Amino acid sequence: MITFYPGPSRVYDKVPEYVRQAYDEGILSINHRSSEFMSLLEHTNQLVKKKLNVPDDYQIFYLSSATECWQVIAQSFDGLSYHFYNGAFGKKWFENTKKIKPLTIGYHYEMNKVLNLSELDLSGEDGLICLTQNETSNGTCISNKRIAKIRKEYPNHIIAVDATSSLGGSKLNIENADIWYASVQKCLGLPAGMSVMICSPYALEARNDCRKYYNSLNAIVDNAAKSQTTHTPNVLNLYLLNRVLATTKNVAKISQGLQDRMKAYLEFFETKVELKPLITNSKVRSETVLVLQGNPELISKIKEEAKVEGIMLGNGYGEHKNGTFRIANFPAIRNKEINSLIEFIDKSTN
Ligand SMILES: *Cc1c(COP(=O)(O)O)cnc(C)c1O
């Protein structure tokens, strides 16, 4: 089965081999307070910084999911949290935070529109601005340029970014925001069960002094200073991330390749009257998740026929469940698989 599901998604081809090697090297049983673990973590940090162009003074942490990052951020920063969202994941982040901090403010914007923060009064001197850089449910993104503009306009706020379905695929200008996070089962091409969170010195300075939870940011930071984690982490996934990053190109190169692939997809779908990209504004269209809309009957027919052919398409998500399907444009997917998909869709439509 070739999967185009945008998470959990296709893992890199080498993953089974790396798992075997992890076993052979004894990685699966190492103690997370041992020097072997500490050097694995340090080396992985170096690779994350190098391959994903993370500024040197940012710190990297390993948590268990993007959802856990929502939790950690909500409980570790005081001040208001402003959530701008246009889709299901951004909304979930907002709702999750609101449960912990009831004064949290959510602002919904149109998915085909460029995000404009000035529609909301952020006049408080501080607080968090929470953005979903790549909205996996509808295939929109927020450009580097837009995030840079927000940084400039709101220099005192902490900018937190959900990059779950873009980190590892899109070239993100990390220096323009304070907190970035992603779980690894999407664009990073690994099995589920771990997330990466990247924090600026500014964000770390602004954290509160909460130590109530096992995953309070203070506990995470203290452990990271010793190249350790608060709890026994997903060592296998850390190892896999290390091995994958060691061989992949710099994300700037990867991103170029994904943009070319997306261009080819869009050109192909221009020839198909019955399937159209949900996102018509090219300024906000994601380069890693393509959402196509059409008649719900056609959508379910295509998905079913695809399955028979060994191709797994992503179901529509949330309010777009019935009228769309999703295609992950993640780096672990091979060119020949994309060709098979295009051939299949060409055959099954007019
Ligand atoms: C998948 C996804 C999440 C949730 O990831 P988990 O690993 O299940 O916590 C959060 N945000 C976005 C944008 C996602 O695509």
Image (cartoon, helix red, strand yellow):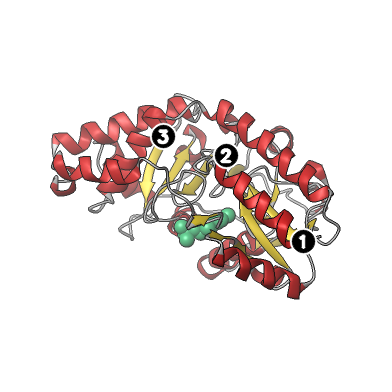
What x and y, as percent, mark residue 264?
Answer: 72, 39
The residue positioned farthest toward the right in the image shown: 273
Alpha-carbon span between mark 1 and mark 3 = 48 Å
Q: Tell me if I can see residue 196 in this picture.
A: yes
Mark 2 or mark 3: name the one nearer the start of the chain.
Answer: 3
Q: Nearer the viewer, mark 1 or mark 3?
A: 1
Q: Are marks 2 and 1 in contact (CB under 8 Å)?
A: no
Task: Determine which residue is flagged by label 3.
Answer: 59
Task: Determine which residue is flagged by label 1.
Answer: 349
289 sits to left or right of 278: left
- Which kind of residue does numbered mark 2 sit on? Asn
Mark 2 or mark 1: name the one nearer the start of the chain.
Answer: 2
Query: Residue at image x 31%, y 49%?
Result: 219
Alpha-carbon span between mark 2 and mark 1 = 21 Å
The numbered disc on residue 335 is 2
Q: Is mark 2 within 8 Å of ligand 1?
A: no
Q: Nearer the viewer, mark 2 or mark 1?
A: 1
What x and y, as percent, mark residue 341?
Answer: 63, 52
Tag 3 secondary structure: strand
The residue positioned farthest toward the front in the image shown: 347
Tag 2 secondary structure: helix
Query: Residue at image x 62%, y 44%?
Result: 339
Query: Residue at image x 77%, y 52%?
Result: 121
Residue 14 falls in image quadrant: top left
Residue 24 falls in image quadrant: top left
Tag 1 secondary structure: loop
- Which kind of residue does numbered mark 1 sit on? Thr
Alpha-carbon span between mark 2 and mark 3 = 34 Å
- Which kind of residue does numbered mark 3 sit on? Gln
- Residue nearest the viewer, comparing 320 with 18: 18
- Residue nearest the viewer, comparing 299 with 99: 299
